[in-house]
Image (cartoon, helix red, strand yellow):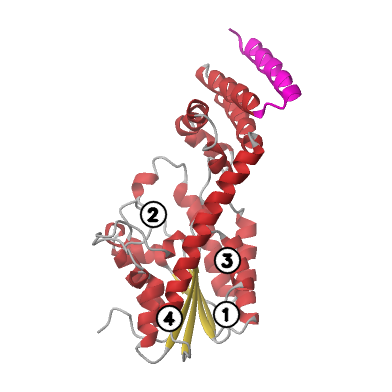
Amino acid sequence: MSIAKMMSIGMSVLKKSQCSDDRITEIEAYIDLANNLAKRGDIEGGILQFKVARSLLLASDVSKVKAAIDRETSIYGKESLSFEQRASELSSKSPNRTAVIVSDSLGLPRGAADSTHDATTFELTHSGLVLAGLSKKGPARVQALCQRFATTEFVVNAIRERADCQNADVLIHIGLNDCVVRMFMNNQRIALGTLSAELRQKIVGFSQVHRNALIESDFDHTFTPLAVFKERLEETVMLARSKGARSVSLATIIQPALKYASKTTQMAWNFARYNMAIYDVAKSLRCHLIDMHLLCWERGTATHLSTDGMHLSAAGHRLMADTYLKAVGFPPASQN
């Protein structure tokens, strides 16, 4: 069958589905066409059809997708709140020194409860270790605002609406979710889970087979464009200071282990672009810089990253806490 014939059939299906408002049929028509074009050697044409299918995911079943998004948002919100509450429980109600720590899942506990490699509790994360370090010189408080899949948008809102920055040392470690080139945006990823297994596999399968070509076609298909990322960092620093922060520290994005590089075109280049924005903001706005990327790679990612190669291990959390405490004038948390 010729490409023109396949496209004609595809358009016929689409017109019919648009009349019946059957978006799932429409998505399937596009992804089938994408796969057929790619198999015939027209990767560029296949990618264009894939992107159309991807753009329609949120409209596949609006009520079902909304329910799935709300459910996942609630789960992550509860996890974040529980972590913040644990920090509050262990903090002094009348502190001499306060830290506000904002991060994504790199700030949260992870791993099996019996893991000797991962930070499995609040006390083993850098939030808990910073609290322990500050407490060595008197009553201390840490407000820990960390949430899975968080980006700089979360950070700006957290500092504006939730953070108690008055006379606090503020640490911001964000960017991994902002900068990675995505096959699917977060809500699209959730929407995929509402489709049939067969249709989901067609879509995900295409993205897996043609991952590098997809990335090459759109390096800016990230959660946060680079310019916006930098603007949000600057806004966060200024907000924290306007609310009375005594210092602001920015931590760099840690590039995952080398095994991911072969699967993702120019990963190092993209991470470097976003890290350079962190360097620029830290220098121009006179923030402390915690170069976690450099530290982890200098001292060994196998030790300082979790077994998934992306998140901090218990040793990584100690390294973050010790470096941060030194920057704000305190001895390392791990020092007896």
* Residue at 38% over, 58% down: 311
Q: Nearer the viewer, residue 146 or 318?
A: 146
Report, in whole angstroms, how far the alpha carbon at label 4 lies from the one at label 1: 20 Å
Report, in whole angstroms, how far the alpha carbon at label 4 lies from the one at label 3: 21 Å
Q: Magenta segment, which residues?
A: 1-23
Check disc 3 and give the amino acid type. Val
Q: Position of residue 257 (x, y in %)?
A: 35, 51
Q: Position of residue 298 (x, y in %)?
A: 32, 64
Check disc 2 and give the amino acid type. Met
Label 1, residues with CA under 10 Å away: few <14, some 14-19, many ≥20: many
Residue 310: mark in rendering:
2
Q: In this rendering, is residue 4 above or below 277? A: above
Q: Nearer the viewer, residue 34 or 284?
A: 34
The first of marks 1 and 2 along the sequence is 1
Q: Nearer the viewer, mark 4 or mark 3?
A: 3
The first of marks 3 and 2 along the sequence is 3
Residue labelled with disc 1: 164
Q: Quadrant of residue 48?
A: top right
Q: Nearer the viewer, residue 96 or 178?
A: 96
Residue labelled with disc 3: 155
Please say if the residues under marks 4 and 3 sit with CB atoms less than 8 Å apart: no
Check disc 4 and give the amino acid type. Ala
Q: In this rendering, is residue 36 above or below 82? A: above
Q: Position of residue 159 (x, y in %)?
A: 60, 72
Residue labelled with disc 4: 327
Check disc 1 and give the amino acid type. Asp
